[in-house]
Structure formats: C-alpha cells, structure tokens
Image (spheres, grey):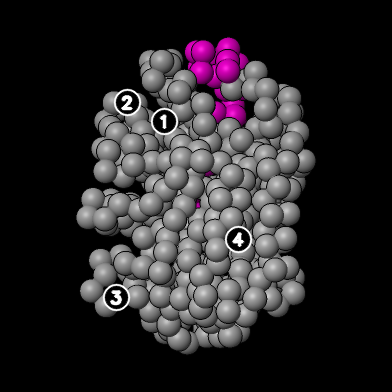
Amino acid sequence: MGLESARYEAIDPAATGPEAIARAFENQVAYCRDNGAPHTATVCQALGALLDTDRGGVTMERVRRWAGPPLSDALPLRIAGGLHALFIAGAEPGLDPIYEGLGPLDSVDRIADAIERHDHALLPWLDGPPQTNEAGRSWAYASTMLWLADKGLPSDFALWELGSSAGINLMMRRYRYDLAGVQVGPETARMRLKPDWRGDPPPAGDFDIVEATGCDVSPVDLTDERQALRLKAYVWPEHTSRFARIEAAIEAAHRFPPEIERINAGDFVDRMLERQPPVGVTRMFAHSVVWQYIAPEEQTRITTAIETAGANATKDAPLAWVMLEANRETHRHELTVRYWPGGGEPVMLANAHPHGEWVNWKG
C-alpha cells in the first residue's frame, strides 16, 4: 500500500478483528495524506505493512491481536504517537529521515527496528486513546458563542467541556481570534488564531466566559514536562504552527492552569446539570474530537441528560451543546450546535480542517 493508493473506506466504528485493524491503518494513511501530514502517513503506512509480518516485538503483536474496535480506539495514532515521542526526545535517530520528510525507501524496516529497540517504552502508548488537544479548534467555540449571542442568548457563557485533555480550549478567554475580520479576545494575547475563513464571517459581537470547567478521565498536566511531551507527540510533525500553539498553551497553563475534573463525561454532565442554572448565563456543553472515544451507552446517557435539561431551559437560563466532530465519510470536521429554548434541532454551522487551519462557514 503506497501513500497515493491508500483509500479511506467507511466501516462500522465498532468493527473488530484483523480486517478492521488493517482497514484502520489504511484509513489513517489516507486521512493523514489528505490533511497535509505525509510524514505521519508514512509512519502509519509502515505500521500497516508490519501487520502481515512477525516484526515489531511485543508492541506490534499486541496491535495484531487488538480486541477492541481499532477505528474507534484510534489504534494507529496510539502507536504513531509513541514513535513521534521517540523522535522528539532524540531517542531513535533511525526515525529522523522519516520525520524530516526525506522519504527513505526502507521506512518499514526503520519503524520495525525502532519498535523493537524501544518495545518496553512503546507498549504503554497503547493503553489509552490519543490526547489531541488543539487550540486551533477553539475557533469553533468562539464562533458559536458569537452565533448564539446573535440568536438572542446571553453573551455570558459557562463553558463546560467534555474530554478536555490538557484544557487548552478551556483557556480560550486568553486567546485572540480573527474570524474573517471579526475580532474577539484580548489584544495582548500571545495565542492568536486566524483560520483561513471561507464563506461569510460569523456574527460580529463579543462574549465573555464567566466559567470554564472541563472533564477528562485522564487529564494532561501541561506544567509537567513529561505529560507535555506526550501531548506534543500527538501533534503531526508537519504542522509547525501547532507546536507554536502548544508552547503558548503551556506558558498560559503555568500562569493560571485550567480547571479539569478527573471524571467521565456522563458523570460530569449530570453534575453540571444538577446545579441551579445561573440567570443571564448561557450554559454551553462543548467537545471537539471526543465523541468517538465515548462508549455508545454513555453517548446515549449524555444525550438524554442534555435533551431533558434543554426541555426545561428558559430564555434567562438557556442551554447549548456544541460539537466539533469528524465526519468519517468526508474526512472533514463538522461544527454542529443545538440550543434550548429554540427547539434543540442540530444546526451545522461549518465544516473545517481537523486542526483549524481552514473553516468553511455555513452558519
């Protein structure tokens, strides 16, 4: 399977077994290639090629015998993150030509050698899903707040984020946005976000975040150097601007860390909704590239809880649900919002690059 011949094929996210594993790797190759990450695509291609061999030590043997759904578990990115961490740390020089984009013809052997030399260090990377916290996605929260305020909802927001990871998006009050000329956020902010905007701009206006709280079953502490390295490892090396954003987020977290509870998303939703709704504040649940990692039964639980609370929402204490999640058929991420009172019907505001490089606004 070459980079150009890899094809994305939509399959049941819950599918398991050898065919699903092979398909997950080919899908990841196509996805990375089509989203400007050829080096990462090369890594995933090499890993896919190892599936039909006996190379790669215990790590690859565990990959071959993966019991869960490899697509939903983002199996290729788990091991790819571990390999990238080796490169960042300078622990495996044999990977340098791949991550430097030199396209070595022996990429499969280089990947196999690296895994076998660092088998013990790489195994833990398979234990949990990728942490892909990305400040570039916070444009979605900012533009939706402007859109909701334009619909008449209070422009003071309580931001409640599911799957916050390191809480980078919870710190968005400290970021500056230029959304097709609509500018919000402090002018002195180091984190400045200006996605390539296609279509009309979002409504002009302003908003304030009066509370920002998130949850994660395994939150990342950006003030811990080792945990910060783990987060960097999941950044595709081709996207240098993302590394700059992570460094800015690390600096922000050292000054004033985000509030993240170590709790699953369903329990977090229940806890937030048990509180007395503040008057004049829009309660906003939000998540980006998280839904696929939540078990179906918990997804149902969350949906039921939010819809039930939405039915009781009032004009003075409204509720919104903002989702920036992948459409696996189009390779695009779609920004969707539901709000109450207002019917709660899903409205797709935009589709976008997975890391916020461009936005196609439809709102």
What distance separates the C-alpha of mark 3 from that of mark 1? 37 Å
Badge number at residue 186: 3
Image location (x, y in percent) of residue 170: 41, 58
Earlier residue among tags 1 and 4:
1
Task: State whether residue 339 is above or below residue 315.
Answer: above
Task: State whether residue 348 is above or below residue 231.
Answer: below
Secondary structure, mark 4, is strand
Q: Do the residues labelled 2 and 1 touch (CB within 8 Å)?
A: yes
Earlier residue among tags 2 and 3:
2
- Note whether residue 348 is visible: no
What distance separates the C-alpha of mark 2 from that of mark 4? 38 Å
Q: Are marks 3 and 1 in contact (CB under 8 Å)?
A: no
Q: Disc 2 marks which residue?
A: 92
Q: Do the residues labelled 2 and 3 touch (CB within 8 Å)?
A: no
Are there few (<14), some (14-19), or many (20+) residues within 10 Å of tag 3? some
What distance separates the C-alpha of mark 2 from that of mark 1? 9 Å
Q: In which quarter of the image is residue 283?
A: bottom right
Q: Disc 1 marks which residue?
A: 83
Earlier residue among tags 3 and 1:
1
